[in-house]
């Protein structure tokens, strides 16, 4: 019988973020799955009801509208002509370009062996260290890979440590928007301006010198600017900036949770190892890269990955 992954570890990094809310721990048990509180001085409603949450997502743009904390809205420019959270044609374009560069077809045709090589290289680097803070190290790994696909960024050769800048940006996202030297928001805003200035310079450089294009995400935007009126320079820069953030935070949280859960369930690790070793044994060349067919054949691995991906929502609901 296949081992099952029971979700009973503590939230860890996610719990720290949750406990910073003004709502006392245990409110979900005291007031039910939906209750009202305040966050950073703003009235909010917290819902841990999966069915109601799903309904809200379905009604986005109709009965409900997207809203973000003041700091988040300012850093990611959710107002004005350059806002990237618009609906309609703009939303369709944003979804399309990300799927073209990170979707299933791209993964199948190009990204899978690159991801394997990148992960193996990162794991080798981790193995030489006494200890590794998985969430941060995972963030850096995922960010550097995504940045390479989006702007041909090479972390080993670049003089700018973009992952470090994003770490400081994220540290200030839950702060009050006080633009005073020394505050978290001031540092967050400073690094945001540094990154967007760099992206703007790259965009202009590629526009002036088409021969420098390498077929990355930014190159695609550069080409599309000639035919899509809403693709202004400001919008394009914010789109790439927001894309970096999406990869930096989400995947690393799942990765950190995976390490925590798997450490508590050795039987799951054993079955995962057996599944992977069986694939290696069936290869003609054991040193060849992972293929799409091999990836799809990992039924237990995909099952575990799916459970881990949904576990964060489960833990958040349990902690409320």
Image (cartoon, helix red, strand yellow):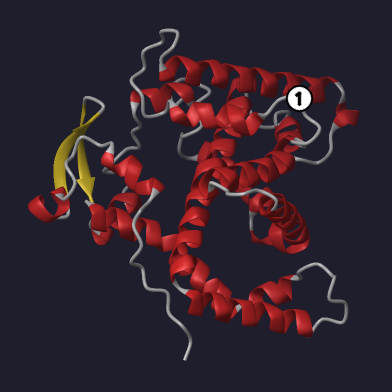
- Nearest the camera: 124 or 108? 124
Could you say whether the residue bearing mark 1 is in a helix, strand or loop?
loop
Relative height, residue 300 to residue 101 (above, below): below
Answer above or below: position of 86 versus 97.
above
Q: Residue 288, position in %: x, y?
A: 84, 70
Which residue position is annotated with label 1?
159
**Where 137 sits versus 76, above or below?**
below
Q: Is residue 91 visible?
A: yes
Image side of residue 133 versus residue 159, left or right: left
Kindly give the residue lying farthest to the left in the view shown. Answer: 30
Residue at screen point 27% across, 60% down: 50
Residue 60 is at least partly visible in this image: no
The spot of residue 74 in percent (x, y) is: 43, 21
Q: Position of residue 47 (x, y in %)?
A: 22, 50
**Which quadrant of the figure has residue 198?**
top right
Left or right of 87 on screen, residue 139? right
Q: Residue at x 33, y 47 (%)?
A: 15
Q: Residue furthest front?
A: 130
Q: Position of residue 220 (x, y in %)?
A: 74, 38
Q: Is residue 169 above or below residue 217?
A: above
Q: Nearer the viewer, residue 270 or 86?
A: 270
Q: Nearer the viewer, residue 111 or 230?
A: 111
Which residue is drawn at the image coordinates 8% and 52% (left, top)?
Answer: 30
Crowding at label 1, few (<14), some or many (≥20) Cα neighbours within 10 Å? Answer: few
Give the side of residue 293 with respect to residue 303, left or right: right
Which residue lies at the image location 62% right of the left edge and 23% below the top edge? 195
Residue 219 lies in what quarter of the image? top right
């Amino acid at each position: 019988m296949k081992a099952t992954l029971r979700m009973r570890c503590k939230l860890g990094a996610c719990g720290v973020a949750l406990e910073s809310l003004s709502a006392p721990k245990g409110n979900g048990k005291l007031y039910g799955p939906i209750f009202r509180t305040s966050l950073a001085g703003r009235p909010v409603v917290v819902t841990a009801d999966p069915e109601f949450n799903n309904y809200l997502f379905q009604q986005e743009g109709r009965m409900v509208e997207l809203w973000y904390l003041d700091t988040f809205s300012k850093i990611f420019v959710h107002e004005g002509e350059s806002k990237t959270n618009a609906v309609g044609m703009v939303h369709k374009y944003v979804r399309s370009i990300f799927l073209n560069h990170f979707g299933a077809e791209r993964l199948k045709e190009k990204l899978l062996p690159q991801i394997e090589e990148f992960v193996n290289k990162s794991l080798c680097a981790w193995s030489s260290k006494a200890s590794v803070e998985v969430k941060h190290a995972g963030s850096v790994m995922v960010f550097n890979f995504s940045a390479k696909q989006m702007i041909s960024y090479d972390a080993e050769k670049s003089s700018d440590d973009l992952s470090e800048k994003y770490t400081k940006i994220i540290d200030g996202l839950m702060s009050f928007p006080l633009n005073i030297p020394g505050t978290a928001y001031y540092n967050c805003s400073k690094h945001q301006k540094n990154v967007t200035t760099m992206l703007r310079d790259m965009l202009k450089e590629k526009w002036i010198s088409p021969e420098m294009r390498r077929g990355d995400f930014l190159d695609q935007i550069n080409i599309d600017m000639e035919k899509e009126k809403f693709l202004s320079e400001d919008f394009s820069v914010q789109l790439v900036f927001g894309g970096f953030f999406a990869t930096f935070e989400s995947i690393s949280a799942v990765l950190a949770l995976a390490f925590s859960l798997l450490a508590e369930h050795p039987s799951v690790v054993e079955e995962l190892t057996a599944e992977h070793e069986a694939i290696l044994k069936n290869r003609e060349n054991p040193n060849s890269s992972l293929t799409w067919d091999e990836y799809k054949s990992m039924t237990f691995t995909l099952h575990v990955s799916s459970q881990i991906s949904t576990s964060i929502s489960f833990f958040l609901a349990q902690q409320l």
